[in-house]
Amino acid sequence: MSARVAKLLSRMTLEEKAGQLNQLSGRMAVTGPLTGKPEHMDQIRKGLVGSFLNILTAARTRELQKVAVEESRLGIPLLFAFDTIHGYKTIFPIPLAEASSWDLAAMEKAARVAAVETSAAGVHWTFAPMVDVGRDPRWGRVMEGAGEDAFLGAAVARARVQGFQGEDLARPDTVLACAKHFAAYGAVEAGREYNTVDVSERALREFYLPPFLATIDAGVATFMASFNEIAGVPSSANRVLMRNILREQWGFDGLVVSDWGSVRELEAHGVAADLKDAARLGLWAGVDMDMESHAYRAHLPELVKTGVLSEALLDESVARVLTLKERLGLLDDPYRYSDEARESGMTMTPEHLATARDVARRSIVLLANQAQVLPLAAKPGRVLLVGPLGDSKLDMLGNWSGKGEPEQAVTLLEGLRARLGDGVRYVKGVDVEGNDESGIATAVQAARRADVVVAALGESARMSGEARSRTNIELPGRQEALLRALVAAGKPVVLVLMNGRPLTIPWAAENVPSILETWFLGTQAGHAIADVLFGDYNPSGKLTMSFPRTLGQVPVYYNQKNTGRPITEKEREWVSRFLDAPNEPLYPFGHGLSYTSFAYGDLQVSPARAGADETIKVSFTLTNTGSKSGEEVAQLYVRDVVASVSRPVKELKGFAKVALQPGQSERVELTVAHKDLALWNQEGRFVVEPGAFELMVGGSSAGIQLRGGFTVAR
Ligand code: NOJ
């Protein structure tokens, strides 16, 4: 810690120290059950609050900051935090959607814009990125993450941290990022929110932790402990996670905040006897700041006075809070983020909106396009838009949409009207949920008079996100009935899906020629979808989470193990399979079509025999063989053929998003770092084992076009 922080620390009472570790929620955007009093001015005056979440706007943060700085004994400024997950006012696609762009620069840019707008509202800290990898679409929080893969998840995590934090945290248009939720939250049993987790050390090290480690490489300032337990130890009491792994092994020197009330919840987990015990466990395990449990403020002073916890331990955490405030420049100018002129000038600017539109169209995945119904002709005749999501502004923003204003969101109807004027008609048909089918007949009549039908169906925004787990991930309500009736009407149908998680849509996949996955694309959704429908932007997104055929397959993911009894040509009965469904998902990880086509050729791998620490260079020729310019996400997978522990049948180890004109070829060069070949061995270490590795390249995890290999020498 700096001399300044040390000096400040030396002047603090135990109560003031505990106060710095106390984070309270304001009333402006509550995101969990409130346990404290709504008005906190008095506590600020007494130096009993270090940070707030959910206090927004330059004016309001300034007001509270003034009390802290002018009326508390030591005048330590407050730290303001907020969940800017995919935009503050200019709302970007939900993170799962953005990840489908595989476009790291776009994701970094989105986070940058979000940071500019968030910081202009007086906020210093966002609780993002969420870097939990997940394989269970029942879990509503998959919408906040990057999907099912740890390698891609790590790359996305890095890009997002860089976007939020920028080059220099001292700049007032950057915000502190927070890697959450540490750890393995994506493994909640049955995808049920806040549920139990029990994963092996290997799964933790190889799968759940790498995106977190990547955020440290990117300089992330803070971590958040998760709600879940792992094998009996809730994260907010998990000393192995927070002290051994995070601090000792990874060298993280930033701040760890609890999740909302997660210190208090140690009681409900049954590992703390009361709130005091919870406070003891939390600090001991490594939670520096207590979000809304009121446990630290109430009990840390006494726990130190009675010698249960050492003051040195308390000081370490307080120093981390003060150091962050110092890094942000708040000790010099506590009001530097609370700038009303910047707030009004920097929010929802034309430039931000243009970025949002561009990121949104990059996030769209063309799942199917059998009869080449898409792209639509510039003059497509009479277009009928049907479905409950066709003109719903609120839903376009997706869940966790910051301070996004639904009125500002562009719906698909508006996006189509911007092009076609009155040439598009809209009929809602059915609601997202519920059993009312009375609107279907009108929709069918309208469909008969149309030349093309666009059906905007899926989930409402509030059906995914925190506390939004589902046991059925089909199209909700009577939407499939509507879709069937539209298809039966005989006109070409384009299904435009909007949803925060993979859905099971086997009927649609069989019967609807063109399916566009648009997730929730944010403020510019309608324009972005129209750009893709009409081919002004050639879709380039690829799924980062498998779409199951049926929920009974879950978890279904691309990097599975072979098992001792894989399906073979010869043996189909006594093998690892289902009687009533294939093993493969409906749409695999990495899948996504384009209006053009790509060919892969001439794979070169060097060296063929790699020494220790040698990087493998992989190159191949990618050609746009179609008639439209487009972008392809070329994916590189590796399989460790024989190892001391079983390895996945393939693992993503590289990718590139390449733009090509019709007929154009490019040599794509990727590298596989030696360390990316490592496995967590039985002795509890990452090692690269010598031997053969298979190498696969293609446009999807199930669409391998080139095969090769290399050996790692002994
Ligand atoms: C609970 C969520 O789990 C977390 O992601 C969020 O940052 C906090 N609430 C604060 O809103």
Image (cartoon, rainbow, N blue to C red):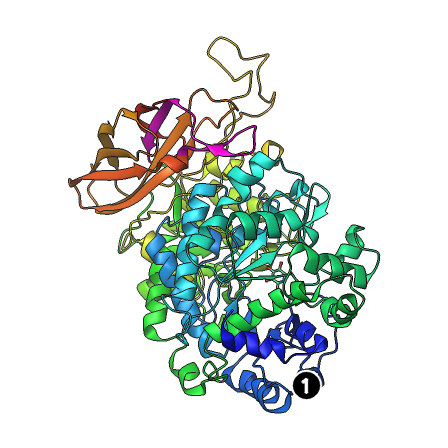
Question: From the viewer's perspective, is residue 479 above or below residue 421?
Answer: above
Query: What residue occupies the far bottom of the structure in this picture?
Result: 70
Secondary element at tag 1 = helix
Give the total number of marks visible in the rendering.
1
Residue 683 falls within the magenta-colored stretch: yes
Q: Tell which of 235 and 193 is nearer to you.
A: 235
Q: Residues within 10 Å of mark 1 (few under 14, many from 20)?
A: some
The three-letter code of the residue at mark 1 reads: Met
In the rendered image, residue 323, in percent from the top left (x then y), is placed at 52, 71
Whether residue 503 is visible, yes or no, is no
Quadrant location of the C terminus in the rendered image: top left
Q: Is residue 173 magenta?
A: no
- The magenta span reads 677-698
Image height of 33 relative to 251, above or below: below
**175 horizontally vs 297: left or right:** left
* Residue drawn at point x = 56 percent, y = 81 percent: 77
Q: Is mark 1 within 8 Å of ligand 1?
A: no
Q: Is residue 601 above or below residue 149?
A: above
Of residues 352 and 125, the one nearer the viewer is 125
Residue 292 lies, in percent from the top left, at 69, 68
Q: Residue at x 47, y 83 (%)?
A: 332
Q: Can residue 356 be spotted in the picture?
A: yes
Residue 446 relative to residue 55: left or right? left
Against 157, is 47 above or below? below
* Residue at (54% x, 13% y) in the render: 572
Dot 1 corresponds to which residue? 41
